[in-house]
Image (tube, grey):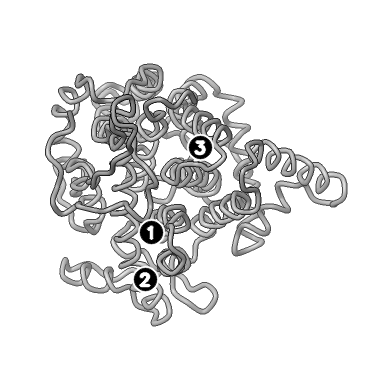
């Protein structure tokens, strides 16, 4: 390789695992996923009979599509179970994505798949632009591995969700399966945190001849990661069950589900996971105290704007500093995150189009760590503003369409509500933590879920 063309370090070498930027027709349903949504989904668009003839509304038992069931199970395989092919580490979820990629192309052409061409094109263009930015700094052979891995974990994961779901009932069944998994893992994680012993890590790693990772202690408990690469990943994953648990119809199952999911989030002892849970709780409380009020979300946005400017004028600190001091477990962490955002944005201003790739990002010398623990900033600093716009467009559309749908209904569909509030929490948490590997796939999956989840039921003018 030409010495004038530096080779970018691998994802492991560049600290990808810690959010670092180097410093200066869907097929048969799975029987295993046979999840009833009777206590969660009030109606499903595919369960509506021909009202013109019978005027009746029927129900049917929804199942999680088999593609999604397998993907979810692969995401839950401990990340230490892997093997390498050249510079690429292959975990279960990466092998799965490689195998299903050709099938996704065929299934995407099915008329049953909801159409969202603008979102799909934006997502497809994102790895193309990322490759262009990488080629502007490195030679072609050294770009193949990082570009291919990122495309696999974003675009392919996105289209797994796009082609798997064909009805909102199936999305509800997926949420039901997901919350049941979290209900099992949540209490296990909390017990491990109290006993200072990760129940998964302490078993899997010794079997592989690897040392057990003991994460730091917070609030007298040890942080749990279970089968994920980092406690933050486990916390964000567990918070995905909050909205589903809260929207359960009956009181006792709702309390039990919420408690078990909350145990899982707490066991990560990460401000990112806890923030994601709190955002969903706040939105749920607001929904409950404003029944039948269609403008509730506009009013909430107005109240938040008033509070923001009130803090700006009344406090000797900025509103963002005040918010982060309460949203993080350590005041020092909040201050450090603000410094990362300040100097990270300076790098964006200096390289807005092509980004820095894996090169050094500019910061004061006393900022010794190259870790940039914010997903949105990492992606923008590395690959430029165009990549950020393309990659985030499907999520932005889903949030706009979701809150618009919620605002037009006096009684929001529980599936739509659970989806929208979790997606919003994912977006906001990504401003304070980094997503990579399994969690990046998990985020892309929910981004691809929008066109189906937010499709109006037949006969619904909204």
Tag 1's secondary structure? helix
Q: Residue 234 carries which label?
A: 1
The residue under label 2 is 189
Q: Position of residue 179 (x, y in %)?
A: 35, 57
Residue ID at (64%, 55%): 334
Q: Which of marks 1 and 3 is nearer the N terminus?
A: 1
The vertical placement of 140 against 77, above or below, is above
Residue ID at (68%, 58%): 325
Horizontal side of residue 455 vs 84, given as left or right = right
Tag 2's secondary structure? helix
Q: Quadrant of residue 131?
A: top left
In the image shown, does 1 or 157 lie closer to the viewer? 157
Q: Distance between the residues labelled 1 and 2?
A: 9 Å
Q: Which mark is residue 376?
A: 3
Q: How many labels does the image show?
A: 3
Q: Residues within 10 Å of mark 3 (few under 14, many from 20)?
A: many
């Amino acid at each position: 390789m030409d010495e004038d063309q530096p080779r970018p370090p691998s994802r492991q070498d560049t600290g990808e695992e810690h959010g670092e930027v180097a410093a200066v027709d869907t097929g048969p349903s799975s029987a295993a996923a046979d999840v009833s949504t009777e206590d969660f989904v009030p109606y499903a668009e595919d369960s509506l009979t021909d009202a013109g003839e019978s005027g009746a509304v029927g129900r049917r038992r929804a199942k999680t599509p088999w593609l999604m069931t397998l993907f979810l199970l692969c995401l839950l395989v401990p990340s230490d179970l892997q093997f390498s092919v050249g510079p690429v580490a292959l975990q279960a979820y990466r092998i799965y994505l490689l195998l299903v990629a050709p099938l996704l192309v065929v299934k995407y052409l099915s008329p049953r798949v909801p159409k969202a061409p603008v979102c799909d094109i934006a997502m497809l263009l994102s790895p193309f632009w990322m490759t262009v930015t990488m080629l502007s700094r490195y030679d072609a052979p050294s770009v193949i591995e990082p570009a291919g891995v990122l495309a696999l974990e974003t675009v392919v994961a996105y289209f797994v969700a796009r082609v798997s779901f064909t009805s909102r009932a199936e999305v509800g069944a997926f949420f039901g399966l997901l919350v049941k998994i979290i209900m099992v893992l949540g209490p296990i994680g909390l017990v491990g945190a109290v006993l200072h012993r990760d129940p998964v890590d302490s078993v899997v790693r010794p079997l592989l001849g690897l040392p057990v990772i003991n994460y730091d202690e917070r609030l007298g408990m040890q942080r749990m990661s279970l089968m994920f690469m980092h406690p933050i990943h486990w916390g964000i994953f567990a918070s995905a069950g909050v909205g589903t648990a809260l929207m359960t119809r009956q009181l006792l199952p709702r309390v039990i589900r919420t408690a078990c999911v909350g145990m899982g989030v707490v066991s990560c002892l990460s401000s990112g996971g806890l923030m994601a849970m709190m955002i969903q709780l706040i939105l749920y409380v607001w929904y409950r105290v404003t029944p039948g009020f269609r403008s509730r979300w506009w009013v909430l946005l107005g109240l938040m704007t008033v509070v923001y400017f009130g803090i700006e004028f009344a406090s000797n600190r900025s509103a963002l500093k005040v918010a982060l001091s309460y949203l993080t477990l350590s005041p020092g962490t909040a201050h450090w995150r603000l410094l990362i955002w300040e100097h990270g944005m300076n790098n964006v201003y200096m390289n807005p189009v092509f980004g820095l790739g894996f090169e050094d990002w500019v910061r004061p010398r006393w900022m010794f760590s190259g870790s940039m623990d914010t997903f949105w900033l990492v992606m923008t600093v590395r690959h430029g503003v165009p990549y950020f716009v393309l990659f985030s467009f499907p999520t932005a559309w889903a949030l706009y369409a979701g809150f618009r749908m919620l605002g037009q209904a006096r009684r929001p569909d529980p599936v739509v509500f659970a989806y929208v509030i979790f997606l919003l929490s994912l977006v906001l948490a990504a401003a304070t933590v980094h997503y990579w590997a399994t969690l990046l796939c998990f985020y892309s999956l929910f981004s691809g879920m929008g066109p189906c989840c937010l499709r109006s039921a037949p006969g619904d003018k909204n």
